[in-house]
Amino acid sequence: MQAAATENQVPDQHQALVDQLCLRAKAASLALAQAPTAQKNLWLKNLAAALRSQTTQLAAANAQDLAAATGLSTAMRDRLTLTPARIEAMAGGLEQLVELPDPVGRVREERRLPSGVHVQKVGVPLGVVLFIYESRPNVTIDAAGLCVKSGNAIILRGGSEAHASNRALVELCRAELVKAGLPADAVQQVSVTDRAVVGCLLAQGDQIDVVVPRGGEDLVRRVSREARMPVLRHYTGNCHMFLDADADPAMASSLVVDSKCSRPGVCNALETLLVHSEWAQQHLSRLMALLREKCVEIRGCPRVVRMGAETGQPVVPARDADWDTEFLDLILAVKVVDSLDDAVAHIQKHSSGHTESIVTGQPPRAEEFLRRVDSAAVMVNASTRLHDGGELGLGAEIGISTGKFHARGPCGLEELASYKYVVRGTGQTRV
């Protein structure tokens, strides 16, 4: 209780800081809402070029954060690291946004009524977005790019472990905004790392239009509990893959390894593998050996533990909590099931609503899985790692929502816009 009270005690200087951030963001959002698409696209292109030209400087700022980071897991340290390849990916993501349609001013629907009234549903920005996130400094650029393109101002509150990296990236964003003739305050960083400031920000329901928390479950639950504005959130990424009885062994192995090992510390990484008993009898021991080569710790159900013992591959017995855990590490929970029904029942009980995938050679079985499983993304013969805005052709994303209101899945440009009704008449009145 004492820790929670400390978090919510807001020093006067923090309140003054938040008030100024919100005032500047609101003013910037009003100006940005009127900015033409070409001007916003110019900023995106110039920022992409600046990222490439400043790779050395950005790496130096990131090195400060890495040097100060202690006690982080390998996966979390990986999330914090800015490599040249990731900086290039950030620049490429901005260029993708240039090619996507601007949601602001886009007519989503229109109709002419019998009375002659013309009705249009037109896209508008949300306004001011508060983005609270941990580690991954690359998402600073994703979030800023998305918000500016969709006409929103953004207040960025990154984790203290990435403060120097985020500061360098935000300074670059602001400099290029000025050059493009856009308000620099469209992108602002919270300059203090004191956690008490978060509570102050979450109380600004009159100034901030939406908050997006992106981080651990504790962070997301705190934001959901305290926020005085709508929240776009996902609690955990407990992603599942089911290997059906006739799944192609080579495809299944490739998809499992990619889903678990390509970046184990991200929300779309595989956490639970469900294996049909017929497939397990023929192929699971080889798959476990492959995962062991990749340094993956397997936590298995009793059948998997027994199979491991028989093949000389000791398996850690899974605890009940493992089926609900987002490991964010090279740990995989594995369970043998006897049917598609069993797999679906397990997913329905333990899923966090993020991503589920089936590997099968039978289209009817795939369609049944798609129909019965309800998560933000449901996949057939595809890696869970494809549940990403860029991979799905949406450009960058500010996060993946596992809720159903108002957005679900990758939150890109369309999800950062609302709409208004534009009604044109010639003197019609209500009869």
Image: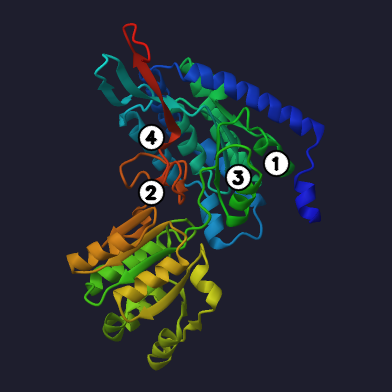
Q: Amino acid at mark 3?
A: Ala
Find disc 4 in the rendering and name its residue: 414
The residue shown at (75%, 33%) is 14
Q: Nearer the viewer, mark 1 or mark 2?
A: 1
The residue shown at (50%, 46%) is 82
Sooner in the amino-acid sequence: mark 2 or mark 3: 3
Residue 221 image offset from top left, x and y in percent: 61, 52
In the figure, is residue 226 to the left or right of 331? Answer: right
Quarter where residue 289 is shown: bottom left
In the figure, is residue 427 to the left or right of 130? Answer: left
Q: Nearer the viewer, mark 2 or mark 3?
A: 2
Residue 238 image offset from top left, x and y in percent: 46, 62
Residue 242 image offset from top left, x and y in percent: 33, 70
Mark 1 neighbour class, 10 Å CA radius: few under 14, some 14 to 19, many 20 or more: some
In the figure, is residue 399 to the left or right of 252? Answer: right
Mark 4 neighbour class, 10 Å CA radius: few under 14, some 14 to 19, many 20 or more: some
Sooner in the amino-acid sequence: mark 4 or mark 2: 2
Find disc 1 in the rendering and name its residue: 199
Q: Which mark is residue 138?
A: none
Q: Amino acid at mark 4?
A: Glu
Q: Amino acid at mark 1?
A: Gly
Separation of residues labelled 4 and 1 (CA atoms): 28 Å
Q: Nearer the viewer, mark 4 or mark 3?
A: 4
Let me know if residue 52 appears in the view: yes
Q: Which mark is residue 162?
A: 3
The residue shown at (40%, 45%) is 410
- Callout 3 secondary element: helix
Sooner in the amino-acid sequence: mark 3 or mark 1: 3
Residue sitting nearer the eye, 381 or 211: 211
